[in-house]
Image (tube, helix red, strand yellow):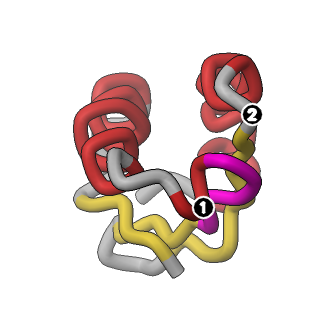
Amino acid sequence: MPDFDSVNKAIQDVRPSLQADGGDIELIAVADDGKVTVKLTGACGSCPMAVMTLKQGVEAYLRKVLPGVTEVVQG
């Protein structure tokens, strides 16, 4: 399973895209089952497209680069 540091490092790769739209992302936790909990902040925190960004953007990328990631959820 991916650890907190490896997930946090991968999140740094997607952060610039979120910041370009006025938002950001904060890693909250990584569970033993591969579930990653994040907090979308700024414009991303209240955006109606946040769920799509989270699943099709952040989750898809993390699952690609860290195969042990099973899901990304808003916390």
- SS assignment for the magenta stretch, majority: strand
Residue 34 lies in what quarter of the image?
bottom left
Question: What x and y, as percent, mark residue 53?
Answer: 37, 40
Residue 18 lies in what quarter of the image?
top right
- Left or right of 5, for residue 70: left
Nearer to us in this view, 32 or 13: 13
Disc 2 secondary structure class: loop
Mark 1 or mark 2, which is nearer the start of the sequence? Answer: 2
Find out whether the residues at labels 2 and 1 contact each other: C-beta distance under 8 Å. no
Q: Residues within 10 Å of mark 1 (few under 14, many from 20)?
A: some
**Residue appearing at x 24%, y 35% in the figure:** 56
- In the rendered image, residue 21 lying in the magenta stretch gets the answer no
Q: Which mark is residue 45?
A: 1
Quadrant housing the N terminus: bottom left
User: Measured along the vertical axis of the image, is residue 18 above or below residue 26?
Assistant: above
In the image, which residues are magenta? Answer: 39-43
Question: What x and y, as percent, mark residue 57?
Answer: 35, 31
Q: Which mark is residue 73?
A: none
**Residue appearing at x 60%, y 61% in the figure:** 45
User: Measured along the vertical axis of the image, is residue 32 above or below residue 4?
Assistant: below
Q: Which mark is residue 22?
A: 2
Question: What x and y, as percent, mark residue 26?
Answer: 73, 58
Q: Which amino acid, mark 2? A: Gly
- Left or right of 36, for residue 10: right
- Left or right of 37, for residue 64: left
The CA span between labels 2 and 1 is: 10 Å
User: Measured along the vertical axis of the image, is residue 73 above or below residue 8?
Assistant: below
Nearer to us in this view, 28 or 50: 50
**Residue appearing at x 69%, y 61% in the figure:** 27
Q: Which amino acid, mark 1? A: Gly
